[in-house]
Structure formats: structure tokens, C-alpha cells
Image: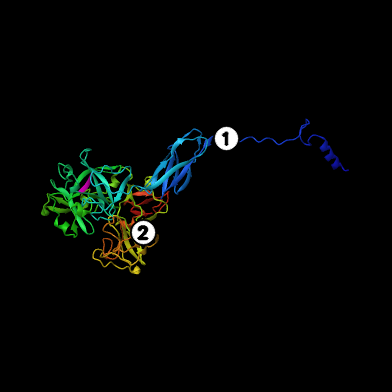
Amino acid sequence: MNKYAWILIACGLIAGCGGGGGGSSSSTPTPTPTPPATSFTVGGTVTGLNGSVSLQNNSGDTITVSANGSFTFPTALSSGGQYSVTATNVLPNYYTCSVANGTGSVASANVSNVAVSCALVPQVAMACGGATSIGTGNVAPLVIDGFPCAAGGTAGAANNANVPYVTVKICAPGSTTNCQIIDHVSVDTGSSGIRMAAAALPASLQPGSNGLPLVAGSTAGHSLTECEIYVSSYVYGPVVSADIYIAGKQVKNANMQVFGASGYTPPTSCIGQGGAETDTIQAFGGNGLIGVGFDLLDQGDFYDCQNSAINTCSPTPISAYAGVPNIVPQFSSDNNGVVIALPSVSSAGLSSPVVGTLTFGVSTQANNTPAASTVAIVNDNTGSFQTQIGGTWNPAYIDSGTFVMFFNDPAANLALCTSNANSGFYCPATPVTVPLIVANAGSKVTAGTFNYQVGNADQINTVSAMAFSNIAGQTSGSSTLSNGSYVAYGLSFFYGREMYFLFNSKTAPGTGLGGTAATTVTGPINGIH
């Protein structure tokens, strides 16, 4: 037996070779029990989301949720700790989110039953008179309801389809009592300034020394009037001063136009520019208009007038006066642009109201910051960019005051309607999808591509519809942009999108606007998402 065998035998005779003595046998140590958890997470589920929502627990622990499903706050709470979950910064702004099971105290397990339910804001018509709300913060509700007030009938009685309206409050300068909340003020991204129908203002707010003060003209005792020209119409009236409120924003002593005021006859040079005078509420299609276009001042024709007589008015260059300004840049904050957001509308159109939002500011708050995937388009100083249709590049502009798309597309060979009611609009036998390739002004480098489905205007019930997303018309061959073809992105293009307008000379962080978070961009810029 060799020496290794003796070692093995010896190890078998002593208590645990290499182990402790004392005659006891070896054993496995008992594991230390895991202590019970002392902190627990809070979470739940999100449903109905169409964009993103910020969730907060106890006003501090914040997460951004961008998809339906489960969520969990990163900060755990001790047993017995209180939790309170809220939902803020819902995007798009025309959605709202409510929280169920959002408050309580943590017991001895994770909380997983917080339920966040999101849905469109109530799609209801705007009140006709007697309105009490103009919105809050930097968001004004935007309603498309056919303007039922004009005819005093049911919604759609005035047949003002695809016209977006907000509610504003007008006060005499410095007064908090001589005020009027005015509903159905149309929103126009193709013009600048506030215009109100005289018929929508009470006697105490009519132009003149006993109401809204007249803005002085260039000659002592004269006042300033304006002729505002649209594509096929015009309005005329005095320029007055007023305090203007919309959402949670205000501008004191701002210039605005009152059209249809008693005793004001349009000068010959105003009438001679063509189109119909739309100085009544029904002809105008609203109680007023808020122009939130790229320009900081409107481009109307101004007159120095002694009174309403035609021969006592003389044209006055806009540079001589403050004119009628875009009021948004005069806000103390959220003043560099606007965002219009609207939900989708089916190809059949809607005979019920559509509710979206007009949000003030671009990239000034979480609720007006474009996503990185937003298509940014740099405009020129006329507010136009480039669009390619059917292989041809055309000047283009985006205008919420134009109710549908207008373009020419020879390549698509779209049939025109034969009915008198829809003359000049397209009526293809089956829907046709038209690609729209966009580029910056002066460029032919593609920034993005969008599809627009053209339906048969004769087959869509435009008489009762308040909103429709697939009607298009043929351009007349001329516009303020060119002597040839052009593309007008009217309100029908806005549905299902967030449309950003960064004003002339105004700046914003570059994310979603053609730059990066570390860069700054300068308007005029459109963003489409």
C-alpha cells in the first residue's frame, strides 16, 4: 500500500479531514431568509392613446407614455406611502385623458391598477351666443360645426363646411365690464389681424367715442379705415382699439378692424378690386376672424378718412400706421407661432361637429413642441414653398381659410364635375390618391411626401356635411403666388394632422423644424405631422 492509501485511511479515521474537530459531523449552513420588501412600485395601463401623455405621481415622478399598454413609475414607495397619479400634456391637444384608481396608499404589494383612459374631447357644436369660455392656458378649442348661428337653425344650416372657429372676448380698452364674448370667430392662417362684424358687437362696443375708440388717421380729426381683400371678397370698416382675450392670453389696446359698421361706405378703390362685399355675418360666414398667418402685420389697404363719404378717403401706406397686427406676437409668452390640430375625418365626411385645438406658441411648451418626425418646410417672405404634383413643381401655401385643396394634376387625369353646384371641382369615378412632394421655397430637394385622396365632389353630401377631407378643386391658373399653376393646402388637408406655423423672423428650437435640439431656426416655417 503506497503512501497515498495511508493518507486516505487516515482521513477516514479522523473527524473531517480538513474540517473542524470536536467529534461533530459536517452539515450545510441554513440560508438566511430574504427580508420582506419594504418599497413598492406604482403603475397601471393606458388605453385610447393616439399620441403621448405625461403621467405624474405625487406631482414629481414623471414619465411620458407614447403607446397604449402598461406603465410603471420609476420611483418606488414605502409601505403605507401615498400616491396620486395625474395626466397632463396630452398630445394631440384635441385628446383628453382621465385617471381612475389614481390615488391611495401602498399596502404590501406593487400597485398595478391605475387606469388611464384617453379619448377625443367631446365633439359638440359651439354655442350660438351666450358663450362663457374662451379656453385656458395657451389652448383655445377649435370647432368646425357649419356655423349654425347664421341662419338661426340647426348645425350646418349656414352650410359653412370646413371652417374652423374659436371664441374670443372683446373689451373696451381698460375695462373689465364693458366686454362681449363672441363665438364663431373663424381662424385664418392666410391673413393677419382681428376683424369683427359690427353686428356681433353690442351697442357699447360699436366704433366711436362711446364704444371702441377709433384709431387716428394722418390728419387731425380723421380716422383710419381698412379694406381687407380676400380671394373673392372684401370687407371694409374702421380700425379701432380694444382689449382682446383668447384662451389664457390677452393683448391690451390692440388695433382691430370692425366691418359692416353703420355709416362707413367703401371707397371706390376698395370696391374696384373685385369680389363681393361680405360685411354681414351671414355673408362673411362668421362673427369675425382672427388672422394668425406668418406676417406680423396685415397687408390690407388703409385709408385716412374724415367720414364715410367716398371722396374724403385717401389711401394710406401701411408703414405710416401700426395697422392691424397679428395679435399672437403681442402675447407676453407663447408668441412665436401657432399650432392647429384636428382629428381625422372619414372619406364620407361628417355631418356632426369636429373639435380640435388652436395652440399658441411653437416649441415653447410640451403641448406645442413638434415631434422629431415632423416634416419642416421653409417658406419665402410671401408664405410659399414648393410642391411637386404629376412631375411638375408649383408654388404652394397652407391656408386654414381655404376650405379644401386646390391644384392641377394633368398626370392624374382627374375628371371635373359636370354639375353646376360643383363646377371647378374634381369628380373622379373612384377615389384617386395624389402624391404631394414638398420642398423648401426655392428648392427642389424633397422634404417630405404626403398623400391626398380625391373623392367625387358630386357624391359627397356637401350640403349637410360640416367637415370633409377628400374634396379638391382645380386652380384658376393664377394667384398672388404666380401667373401659372399653384397648390393651396386648404383645411381638408389639416384633418388628422398637427400643422405648425413659425412666424416671420420668430425663432424656435430646431427639433421637428429642420434643425436639432441644439440649434435654433427662424420662420417662416411650416411643420406637418
Q: Is residue 383 above or below residue 208?
A: below
Residue 351 occupies which quadrant of the picture? bottom left
Residue 188 coordinates in the image, percent (x, y): 27, 53
Q: Are marks 2 and 1 in contact (CB under 8 Å)?
A: no
User: In the image, what residue type sits under mark 1?
Assistant: Pro
Residue 309 coordinates in the image, percent (x, y): 11, 52
* Residue named by callout 1: 36
* Region in magenta: 253-257
Q: Is residue 284 above or below residue 83?
A: below
Residue 26 occupies which quadrant of the picture? top right
Q: Tell whether position 214 is magenta.
A: no
Q: Nearer the viewer, residue 126 or 387?
A: 126
Q: Main secondary structure of the magenta part?
A: strand
Q: Decide if residue 302 is in sight here.
A: no
Q: Nearer the viewer, residue 167 or 196?
A: 167
Q: Does residue 528 appear to the left or right of 226 in the view shown?
A: right
Q: Nearer the viewer, mark 2 or mark 1?
A: 1
